[in-house]
Amino acid sequence: QLQASGGGFVQDGGSLRLSCTSSGPIFNADSMGWYRQAPGRQRELVASIASGGIASYADSVRGRFTISTDAAKNTVYLQMNSLKPEDTAVYYCNKRDLVYNDYTDNHDIHEYWGQGTLVTVSS
């Protein structure tokens, strides 16, 4: 179970930090990520961090957003700076686990989602 928090209302150019705490350990997750969905649009990947610590970002947020994890707290963060009105969306955290399937001798992808937290940026 993932619990996201930190959304709110900010003005253009402001900052927010989102947090997402997992009820289980995240140190062994294949990846942790943040997605967002604006009204009338599809959910899109904003940022993710792989188990090796490599982070990746959507072009639209690179240089403004930073994803990080604290394994001791089972928490993933998204620091959002220089926010723009187009960043307005519901933000969802995501945890992806690879679970070995001994029947197929392969790994299955298990994904978990937080409940979403609303970020509103006014112009």
Image (cartoon, helix red, strand yellow):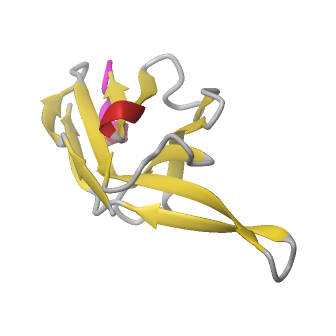
Q: Residue at x 54, y 48 (%)?
A: 45
Quadrant housing the N terminus: bottom left
Residue 51 relative to residue 105: left or right: left
- Which residue is outermost to the bottom? 103
Give residue 89's position: percent from left, percent from top. Answer: 32, 50
Counting labels gives 0
Q: Residue at x 49, y 54 (%)?
A: 95
* Quadrant of the image occupied by residue 16: top left
- Which residue is outermost to the left? 9
Residue 63 relative to residue 110: left or right: left
* Quadrant of the image occupied by residue 108: bottom right
Give residue 81's position: percent from left, percent from top. Answer: 32, 20
Q: Residue at x 23, y 22 (%)?
A: 15
Nearer to me, 47 or 51: 51
Q: Magenta segment range?
A: 81-86
On screen, 86 above or below 52?
below
Q: Residue at x 25, y 29 (%)?
A: 17
Is residue 82 highlighted in magenta? Answer: yes
Quadrant housing the C terminus: top left
Give residue 69's position: percent from left, percent from top. Answer: 42, 31
Residue 56 relative to residue 68: left or right: right
Is residue 67 highlighted in magenta? Answer: no
Nearer to me, 99 or 44: 99
Give residue 46's position: percent from left, percent from top. Answer: 50, 41
The overriding secondary structure of the stretch rendered in magenta is loop
- Which residue is outermost to the right? 105
